[in-house]
Image (cartoon, rainbow, N blue to C red):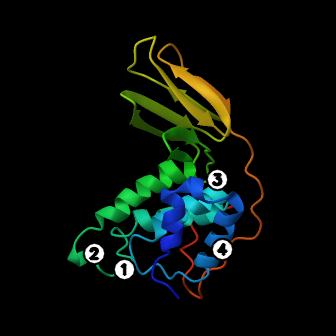
């Protein structure tokens, strides 16, 4: 058993260094061995679970990260807030369900929403512009709400190159999530609380 999966964090931080098959295999290996005794563990695992398509598991890990202090999950909230866990929850939303990657200076999105989230919106600054991303189960919308008409940002959406300008939003459909196979096992008694419903 391990406290937290450092290789899972490495796959989050250096996504271009691992193939999709390696990510799925490594997530399954460490999910079965990681007890998440660190408040920093659930968020990276949520990001990778979402990327490989295990959206229910990703949602439950995201909730664990959000509720670290509210539910006093580690029985340590009296010692202070777990701010890194809260920041990790934001990463689980934006990198996990939003699919945001900045790999070698290329901005890309491979969004996929779990059933419990019917809309996700966030903004980020990219090369001097505020990029607003709004996701629903049907589509992704990218816009530069504060930019001049001649401003532009290049990004990728599920492998398609897009140019977003200050003139109007760009929308694209959300492709179906491929079947990732059976959910990775967790150590006995250590699966995050099931929050997803059918």
Assign a secondary structure to mark 4.
Answer: helix
Which residue is label 2 attached to? 77
> Can residue 98 be seen in this snapshot?
no
Is residue 110 shown above or below 96? above
> Quarter-wise, where is residue 119 in the image?
top right
Q: Are marks 2 and 1 in contact (CB under 8 Å)?
A: yes
Residue at x 44%, y 17% (from the top left corner): 151
Label at residue 74: 1
Task: Name the N-terminal-most of marks 4 and 3.
Answer: 4
Asked if residue 133 can be seen in this view, the reply is: yes
From the image, state whether disc 1 or disc 3 is nearer to you: 1
- Measured as percent of width and height from the top left, residue 184 is found at 67, 74
Q: Tell me how far mark 1 sits from mark 3, CA to CA.
A: 27 Å
| Whole-number angstrom distance, CA of label 2 to CA of label 1 | 7 Å
> CA–CA distance between discs 2 and 4?
30 Å
Label 1 vs 4, first from the N-terminus: 4
* Residue occupied by mark 3: 115
Q: Secondary structure at mark 2?
A: helix
Question: Would you name the residue on which mark 4 appears?
Answer: 28
- The secondary element bearing badge 3 is classed as loop
**Image coords of residue 168 (percent x, y):** 53, 16
Residue at image position (42%, 22%) is 145
Above or below — where is 110 with respect to 2? above
Give left or right: position of 60 versus 76.
right
> Mark 2 or mark 3, which is nearer the start of the sequence?
2
Q: Nearer the viewer, mark 2 or mark 4?
A: 4
């Amino acid at each position: 058993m391990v406290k937290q999966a450092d290789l899972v964090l490495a796959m989050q931080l250096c996504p271009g260094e691992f193939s999709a098959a390696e990510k799925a295999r490594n997530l399954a290996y460490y999910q079965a061995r990681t007890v998440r005794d660190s408040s920093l563990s659930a968020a990276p695992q949520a990001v990778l679970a979402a990327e490989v398509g295990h959206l229910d598991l990703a949602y439950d890990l995201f909730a664990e990260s959000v509720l670290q202090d509210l539910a006093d999950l580690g029985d340590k909230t009296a010692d202070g807030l777990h701010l890194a866990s809260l920041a990790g929850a934001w990463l689980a939303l934006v990198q996990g369900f939003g699919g945001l990657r900045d790999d070698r200076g290329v901005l890309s999105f491979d969004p996929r929403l779990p059933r419990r989230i019917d809309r996700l919106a966030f903004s980020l600054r990219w090369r001097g512009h505020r990029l607003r991303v709004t996701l629903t189960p049907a589509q992704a919308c990218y816009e530069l709400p504060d930019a001049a008409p001649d401003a532009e940002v290049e990004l990728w959406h599920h492998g398609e190159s897009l140019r977003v300008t200050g003139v109007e939003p760009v929308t694209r459909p959300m492709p179906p999530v491929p079947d990732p196979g059976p959910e990775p096992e967790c150590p006995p008694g250590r699966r995050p609380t099931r929050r997803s419903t059918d």
